[in-house]
Amino acid sequence: MDELGFHRAMHRPGTLVDVGAHDGMLTLPFAALPASRVVAFEPLPPAFARLEAAVRAAYGGTVPPHIGLRREALGSAPGQVTLAVPWLGDDAIEQWASMVKDFDALQRHDPRISRIDRYAAEVITLDSLNLADVTAMKVDAEGAEEAVLRGALATLRRCQPVLSVELEERHCTGCTRTVPALLADLGYTGFFNLSGAWRPLAEFDPASMQVAPLGPSDPPSDPYVAVFMFVTPALMPRMAALRQAAIS
């Protein structure tokens, strides 16, 4: 089961937060879930333009009231940040866009990187929006996931949404340990999907399950586990059913 399948299986009416919405791959399916409202964050200007275009194309040229599109980045405190995007030849590798990765150092060691574009973005915290009914969050911030979650601690405590979080050591060393520890302090239990089976986070081994590519054009290891799901005790029965269904 993929990330979208997890969210569909665990869905509850309310607000779904899509952090790192990019082209809307999850924003649009989230918006189609029953009684859902979506708040999608995409600070990279070219990606935001495509996100808005995709939403308008799906809804007759308008952005419907139950979808909120936001250009800000989320973080642990308000401020400004610079997003860097590497290019390989004539292609921008937007999936590597990052607020934290040292692309200058990477470029010195990888001549395939032809240029690095930089964009300024405003940073806000999710808590500053005072959302009352968040039932799910997807967080893909290319190394800034812990900062996003620290800026959402009040929301997480208040709403206890299910979470899918992309954690990659190549973007932030140690994140596969520090982020689960942060969430465990809030009562969350983590899982990942490998070969169709839901496994507890304690079984994750980055040395064999997340061998990172050296550069934007290099293939990752197989398997490469990068998305982790987190649930609170109240939803553990649903998670247990999901794990059992994967076995059956």
Image (cartoon, rainbow, N blue to C red):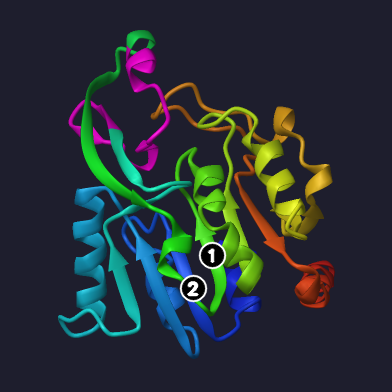
- The amino acid pointed to by label 2 is Leu
User: Residue at 41% across / 67% down in the picture?
Assistant: 129
Q: On the image, which quarter does residue 161 sit in?
A: bottom right
Q: How many numbered circles does the render carry?
A: 2
* Secondary structure found at label 1: strand
Residue 131 percent across, percent down from the top left? 47, 74
Determine whether, in the image, residue 172 is placed left or right of residue 121: right
Per the rendered image, the range of residues in magenta is: 85-107
User: Residue at 37% across / 42% down in the picture?
Assistant: 95
* Residue that label 2 marks: 16
Residue 202 percent across, percent down from the top left? 83, 44
Residue contact at pointers 1 and 2, CB within 8 angstroms: yes
User: Residue at 65% across / 30% down in the picture?
Assistant: 174
* Secondary structure found at label 2: strand
- The amino acid pointed to by label 1 is Met
Within 10 Å of disc 1 (Cα), the crowding (few <14, some 14-19, many 20+) is many
The CA span between labels 1 and 2 is: 6 Å
Within 10 Å of disc 2 (Cα), the crowding (few <14, some 14-19, many 20+) is many
